Amino acid sequence: MAKSVLSTSALRTIVTEIAAEMAASEDRGNVAAYIPELACIDPHRFALAIVTPEGEVIAAGDADMPFSIQSVSKAFTLAVALGQMGEALWTRVGREPSGDPFNSIVQLEHEQGIPRNPFINAGAIAVTDAILSGYEPREAIAHILEFIRYTAGDDEILIDENVARSEEATGFRNAALANFMRDFGNVTCEPAMTLGVYYHQCAVVMSARQLAMAGRFLAFDGCLRPGGSRVISGRMARQINALMLTCGHYDGSGEFAFRVGLPGKSGVGGGILAVAPGRASIGCWSPGLNAVGNSKLASLALEMLADRTGWSVFAPH
Ligand code: GLN
């Protein structure tokens, strides 16, 4: 289906129908119990929100319910780090899919502490360390939060300190990754400081509506709307989208690209930010995860959305 034939009301019907189908689904996956604060989230939640080029928001389900964005934050910190240090960031992190779980350590030793990409935990920790260099942790956290608030156009977005503390107390594997990279010189700050900032970025709380708003700069070539205020260069937005498509779902990235055909970034809170370039920024949330740690129903809902709208980076515009 071409863009021109999709009216707002047709889009609204599609979004409402998908939300209703997802609400009725019995097989919802499992919430991320390894972060104690996330273990108690109700798996029956589902939200879908879309922002159009005109700035209209089409939303259904629990679209205003806040959730922990977790690794979705890595798309924003990548933009912040690229803005801060430009191409030099790529000496510290690669641009290849890892094919391994998000928290894996195995490739790091062979590859001298340079993580495969900025979206696996090791890569995101290196990116956060780059942002932190020269700042106090609270300044870096404030800077990241400011960026997210600006992109979302919403100053109410907050960080859940309980989630950050909960991860700080139990994140032994992330501590291993940070210390390992510290030894290779690819974490330059005190690992505990870098991890503190990383846990706070993961603990940002947003609704699907806010997430869809925050993703506009990726959907509209670096701007908040086509031809509107510029957040990052168009080239940089396209590069982040390319990485979201190839690496945004860890070892489920190939499957997501195959099924959905849109760049996406998932988090273990059950959120996914997806981008239909030039057409929509999409926030989707359901807390139950599949075996590789991506939201089961949000992935399915995005597949349905792509199917019913015809949106795909592989389809002609
Ligand atoms: N904060 C989580 C962690 O570091 C983020 C992981 C994720 O969302 N995939 O384990």
Image (cartoon, rainbow, N blue to C red):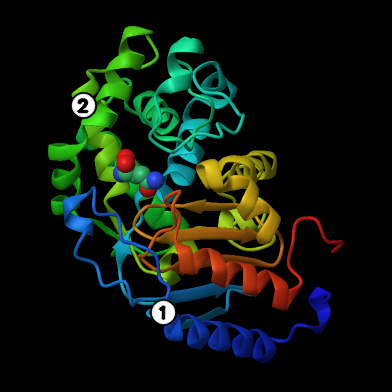
Q: Residue 306's x, y, as percent?
A: 68, 69
Decide if residue 312 is in sight here.
yes
Side of 56 relative to 6 (left or right) = left
Above or below 284: residue 294: above
Q: Amino acid at mark 2?
A: Met
Q: Residue 57, labelled with which disc?
A: none
Q: Residue at x 66, y 91 (%)?
A: 9
Within 8 Å: ligand 1 and the Cβ of disc 2? no
Q: Position of residue 73 (x, y in %)?
A: 40, 47
- Residue 181 lies in quadrant: top left
* Separation (CA) of disc 1 from disc 2: 41 Å
Looking at the rendered image, the quarter that the N terminus falls into is bottom right
Mark 1 residue crowding within 10 angstroms, few (<14) / some (14–19) / many (20+):
few
Residue in the foreground of this view, choosing between 134 and 47:
47
Quick one: 156 or 166, which is closer to the camera? Answer: 166
SS for dot 1 = loop
Residue 53 seen from this side: no
First reached walking from the N terminus: tag 1 or tag 2? 1
Residue 47 position in % (x across, y down): 43, 75
Q: Quadrant of residue 271?
A: bottom left
Looking at the figure, which quarter contains the C terminus? bottom right
What SS does tag 2 mark? helix
Which residue appears at 61% of the width and 54% of the height?
256
Please give the residue where the numbered disc 1 appears in the rendered image.
26
- Label 1 or label 2, whichever lies nearer to me, is 1
- Pointer 2: residues within 10 angstroms few (<14), some, or many (20+)? some
For ligand 1, the image quadrant comes to top left
Amino acid type indicated by mark 1? Glu
Please say if the residues under marks 1 and 2 sit with CB atoms less than 8 Å apart.
Answer: no
Residue 193 - label: 2
